[in-house]
């Protein structure tokens, strides 16, 4: 028996090794099977992701194709008193519907893919702001031509003359445009004007995203806010003008400060709230009574403060560089525009008072820059204009009349357009109010953006700004307002996953787009310029010797874009045009024994029809009276422009 034990033990070991090898092989097979299933799953996931991206991008591509093909069917000369919307074919509206569908699909992806939403936003910018450039013959707005003339003056003279034009008291923008024009090799700054609205709105997008991301980590809320910003930017201050550049600098300053210099920012999941503690409250016995306002603001801030999205990580050198950028841009704003510096100072000072920023000395530096420039460099403007600057302080009735009441006049179509602008303003603010309330109910107290939304309004008490202060207040309040408007749909990260949310966004976007077309392009009948009008003015500059008087029925025409300082400009009063007082016109053109030229254009006639309240065709009748009079000779005549001189002059 013992002789047979060894073979048995050997057989048992062999069996054990066989079973072990089998188990190992089975484990290997299971591992390979799991790995293969994982690869297949990844492949399926990648395929599904690719298909989803293709589905999301298809409406965007289709929208741009439909929009591009629709432009050839736009006849700008068919524009009525309702504006550009009267000349657009239905396919343009279909293009917007497709673009909105693509944007909503992009927001549905988790995580939100930045290139995809950027593509939709760029498409929206071209659709909203590029359409006039592609369908109109020349850059719109008569003021665009005048401002280009200021830059052309700088190009020729390499200097500015503050006594020539009030804009030259803030010459930074014109110096920059003259430089860019020369570097680009253009003959005239008007070469930059056509695409200025698209350019400025696209560059606004960068700092706007910084501002919105400083308030929430929810990318859907950020990008929807940017979408609403484009749809809400109807006031038309993004043409080739100092305001457009100043607003960009304003956004960059706020974006840098809110991303790197917020006070008391901490990481969060949007559920933690700040309360005053030993390390947060102002130090007892710290300062004199002048610090009472700051401490009161801090106490109010603590009551309603939210835990901020944390500042971006940075090292001291980066923070010094960021502050240098802010100070440089602040100086650029001060020397480029009259109003933006005060908006900038008010916003930064309010954030500092409420302990939203750590840069407490920055408002003082900004105030010094503003006061220094006004006291020394803008002194020629202040001489004789003190009443214009300070006359409206505290006179709220005058401000309301000039900003609202005086604008609700003109033709029935124009009155409807003005009403649509009021409706658009109230609609955006109502959306913001609802979104702010929803955020508040979920425990989100967005004090920083709420301050920025409110800060511009006190300027309504100080200045009417030529009847445009309400428009400027709306513009500067728009970035924080669109955040709260977007919060109607994406209040917190866990809200908005239902398919009902994209449908609601699409419906609201369609309503805003319809209002946008009326509000922004409602005056297009008088805002667009034809090549015949431009040719007439170019001919005028060829034949009119320096020192001549250029007379017009109204200032709404493409002039003053070259040799600005070499001529005198005279606009006849509306009453004299209505009464066809030719004796007055002759007296104005012959006084002083100078050469004088009377220019009548299509755009002037459109302005009278829209704004004057006179019967349509008033300027046509005035022109016909001149043609039939022996007191005038015609030296240029086209369908859209005519130039007259006094007979035997």
Image (cartoon, grey):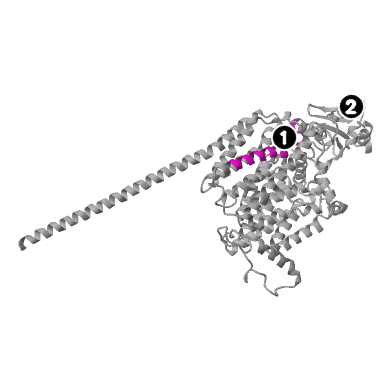
Q: Residue at x 50, y 39 (%)?
A: 54
- Location of residue 89 with respect to 129 vertically, above or below: above
Question: In the image, is 415 to the left or to the right of 592?
Answer: left
Q: Position of residue 593 (x, y in %)?
A: 93, 36
* Residue 530 sits inside the magenta stretch: yes
Question: In the image, is 385 to the left or to the right of 240?
Answer: right
Q: Position of residue 587 (x, y in %)?
A: 94, 35
* Residue 316, numbered circle: none
Q: Earlier in the sequence, mark 1 or mark 2?
A: 1
Considering the whole magenta stretch, tell me its main secondary structure: helix
Give 139 or 111, whichever is nearer the viewer.
111
* Range drawn in magenta: 503-531
Question: Which residue, given by chain and number where applicable, does mark 1 sit on?
Answer: 138
Q: Quadrant of residue 123?
A: top right
Question: Viewer-nearest of labels 1 and 2?
Answer: 2
Give 374 or 395, whichever is nearer the viewer.
395
Q: Position of residue 368 (x, y in %)?
A: 76, 61
Image quadrant holding the C terminus, namely top right
Any part of residue 119 in sight: no
Question: Which residue, given by chain and number where applicable, does mark 2 sit on?
Answer: 625
- Location of residue 153 with respect to 284 vertically, above or below: above
Crowding near the residue tagged with mark 2, few <14, some 14–19, many ≥20 C-alpha atoms within 10 Å: some
- Location of residue 433 with respect to 119 vertically, above or below: below
Q: Position of residue 4 (x, y in %)?
A: 6, 60
- Location of residue 6 with respect to 649 vertically, above or below: below
SS at badge 2: helix
SS at badge 1: loop
Image quadrant holding the N terminus, namely bottom left
Question: In the image, is 329 to the left or to the right of 611?
Answer: left
* Residue 380 sits inside the magenta stretch: no
């Amino acid at each position: 028996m013992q002789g047979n034990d060894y073979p048995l033990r050997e057989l048992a070991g062999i069996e054990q090794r066989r079973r072990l090898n089998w188990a190992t092989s089975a484990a290997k097979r299971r591992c390979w099977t799991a790995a293969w299933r994982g690869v297949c799953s990844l492949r399926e996931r990648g395929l599904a992701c690719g298909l989803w991206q293709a589905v999301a991008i298809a409406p965007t591509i289709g929208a741009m194709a439909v929009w591009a093909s629709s432009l050839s069917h736009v006849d700008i000369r068919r524009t009525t008193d309702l504006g550009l919307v009267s000349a657009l074919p239905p396919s343009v509206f279909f293009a917007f519907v497709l673009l909105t569908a693509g944007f909503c699909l992009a927001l549905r992806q988790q995580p939100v893919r930045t290139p995809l939403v950027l593509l939709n936003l760029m498409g929206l910018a071209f659709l909203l702001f590029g359409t006039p450039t592609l369908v109109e013959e020349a850059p719109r707005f008569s003021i665009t031509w005048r401002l280009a003339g200021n830059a052309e003056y700088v190009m020729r003279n390499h200097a500015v003359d503050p006594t020539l034009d009030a804009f030259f008291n803030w010459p930074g923008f014109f110096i920059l445009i003259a430089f860019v024009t020369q570097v680009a090799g253009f003959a005239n700054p008007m070469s930059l004007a056509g695409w200025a609205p698209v350019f400025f709105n696209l560059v606004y997008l960068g700092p706007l995203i910084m501002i919105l991301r400083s308030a929430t980590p929810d990318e859907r809320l950020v990008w929807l806010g940017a979408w609403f910003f484009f749809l809400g930017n109807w006031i038309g201050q993004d043409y080739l003008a100092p305001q457009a550049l100043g607003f960009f600098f304003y956004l960059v300053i706020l974006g840098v400060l809110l991303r790197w210099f917020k006070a008391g920012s901490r990481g969060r999941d949007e559920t933690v709230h700040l309360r005053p503690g030993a390390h947060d409250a102002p130090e007892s016995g710290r300062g004199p009574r002048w610090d009472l306002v700051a401490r009161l603001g801090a106490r109010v801030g603590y009551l309603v403060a939210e835990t901020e999205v944390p500042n971006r990580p940075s090292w001291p050198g980066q923070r010094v560089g960021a502050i240098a950028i802010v100070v440089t841009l602040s100086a650029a704003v001060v020397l480029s525009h009259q109003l933006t510096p005060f908006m900038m100072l008010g916003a930064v000072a309010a954030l500092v008072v409420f302990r939203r920023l750590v840069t407490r000395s920055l408002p003082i530096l900004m105030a010094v820059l503003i006061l220094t420039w006004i006291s020394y460099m803008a002194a020629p403007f202040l001489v004789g204009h003190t009443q214009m600057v300070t006359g409206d302080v505290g006179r709220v009735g005058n401000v309301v009349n000039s900003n609202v009441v005086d604008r609700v006049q003109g033709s029935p179509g124009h009155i409807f357009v003005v009403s649509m602008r009021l409706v658009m303003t109230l609609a955006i603010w109502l959306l913001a109010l609802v979104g702010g309330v929803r955020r508040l109910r979920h425990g989100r107290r967005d004090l920083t953006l709420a301050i920025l939304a409110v800060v511009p309004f006190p300027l309504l008490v100080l200045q009417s700004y030529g009847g445009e202060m309400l428009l400027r207040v709306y513009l500067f309040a728009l970035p924080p307002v669109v955040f709260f408007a977007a919060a109607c749909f994406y209040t917190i990260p866990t809200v908005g996953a239902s398919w009902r949310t994209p449908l609601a966004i699409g419906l609201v976007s369609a309503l805003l787009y319809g209002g946008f077309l009326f509000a922004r392009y409602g005056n297009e009948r008088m805002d667009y310029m034809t090549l015949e009008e431009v040719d007439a003015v170019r001919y005028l500059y060829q034949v009119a010797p320096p020192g001549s008087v250029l007379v017009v029925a109204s200032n709404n025409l493409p002039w003053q874009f070259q040799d600005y300082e070499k001529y005198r400009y005279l606009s006849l009063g509306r009453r004299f045009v209505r009464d066809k007082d030719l004796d007055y016109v002759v007296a104005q053109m012959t006084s002083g024994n100078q050469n004088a030229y009377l220019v009548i254009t299509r755009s002037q006639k459109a302005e009278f029809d829209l704004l004057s309240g006179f019967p349509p065709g008033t300027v046509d009748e005035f022109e016909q009276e001149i043609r039939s009079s022996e007191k005038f000779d015609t030296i240029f005549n086209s369908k859209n422009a005519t130039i007259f001189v006094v007979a035997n002059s």
